[in-house]
Structures are given as C-alpha cells and as structure tokens.
Image (cartoon, rainbow, N blue to C red):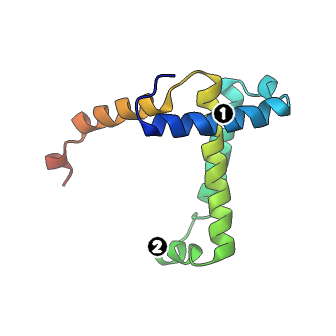
Amino acid sequence: MKTVNNMTLEIEKLQNCIRAFCEARSWDQYHNPKELAIGIITEAAELLDHFRFKSEAQMQELFKSPEKKAAIEEELADVFYFVLRFAQMNDIDLSQALEKKLAKNELKYPVEKAK
C-alpha cells in the first residue's frame, strides 16, 4: 500500500491490528466478501436501532448517558471493524478510495449548489 498521507498510515496500522487478531483465531476462512458485507450491514443496523423512532431531543439525550453513549460507540466500532477488515481482506486502499469518492462528490455536489 502506497503511503499517500498520515491517514493511510493510521488505517494500515488499524488493519494490521485487526489482521493479527483475526489470524490468531483462524478467522480468515470466514471473512469472505459476502460475510464481511453482512457483518457491516448487521452492525450498522444495530447502530441504527439506538436511534430508531427517536426525536432529535431524545437522540441528543442518548449521548448524555455514559452507558448509552458507550453502547453506541461499541456499535460504531463494530461497523468500523468490519469496514477495515473488508478492505484489508480484499486489498482495498481505503485512503485512496475515500479521496476518489470525495473528489467525485465535489463535482457532483459543488458548494455553490449545495447551499
């Protein structure tokens, strides 16, 4: 992976931690693209469940409760884990992918039209 910037280094470091964790448990056999994509959507749904049917005020209250905020953080970390693992297992440079997507979105949603 080419180092584009510090973000690449940090993502690579996180992916290496996840790789070591999963290899120690022989989980590579279970982490094909389909299963990892299922993991992403499952964990994202668990994150969404915290906010489902809540008003703006109720959602803000969630973050004031240390226990509820910790539960939200855990679900977000699960989503992040699966995204990092998916990219790591399939040789996707997330830094480059994000840079390309942002450039594409800059063209699609120019500032002057977005406001």
Closest to the observer: 12 or 63?
12
Residue 98 x, y percent position in the rendering? 41, 35
- The amino acid at mark 1 is Asn
Is 12 situated left or right of 100 in this image?
Answer: right
Q: Hey, which quadrant is residue 65 in on the image?
A: bottom right
Q: Report which quarter residue 75 is drawn in.
A: bottom right
> Which residue is nearer to you in this view: 97 or 46?
97
Q: Position of residue 70 (x, y in %)?
A: 66, 66
Q: Which structural element holds mark 1?
A: helix
Q: Residue furthest right?
A: 25
Residue at image position (65%, 24%) is 89
Judging by the rendered image, the residue that carries numbered circle 1 is 16
Q: Which mark is residue 86?
A: none
Task: Kindly give the residue lying farthest to the left in the view shown.
Answer: 112
Would residue 30 be found to the left or right of residue 46 on screen? right
Q: Mark 2: which amino acid?
A: Glu
Determine the secondary structure under disc 2: helix
- Where residue 111 appears, as percent x and y from the top left, is 18, 47
Sort mark 2 into few (<14), some (14-19) or many (20+) by Cα contacts within 10 Å.
few
Find residue 10 and report its horizontal and vertical position in percent.
53, 40
The residue positioned 50% from the left and 27% from the top of the image is 93
The residue under the point 14% across, 48% down is 112
Read off the residue under disc 2.
56
Q: CA distance from mark 2 to mark 1?
A: 38 Å
- For the C terminus, give its image quadrant: bottom left
Label 1: how many residues lie within 10 Å, few (<14), some (14-19) or many (20+)?
Answer: some
- The vertical placement of 47 against 26, above or below, is below
Q: Which comes sooner in the sequence, label 2 or label 1?
A: 1
Q: Closer to us: mark 2 or mark 1?
A: 1
Point 54% across, 37% down: residue: 11
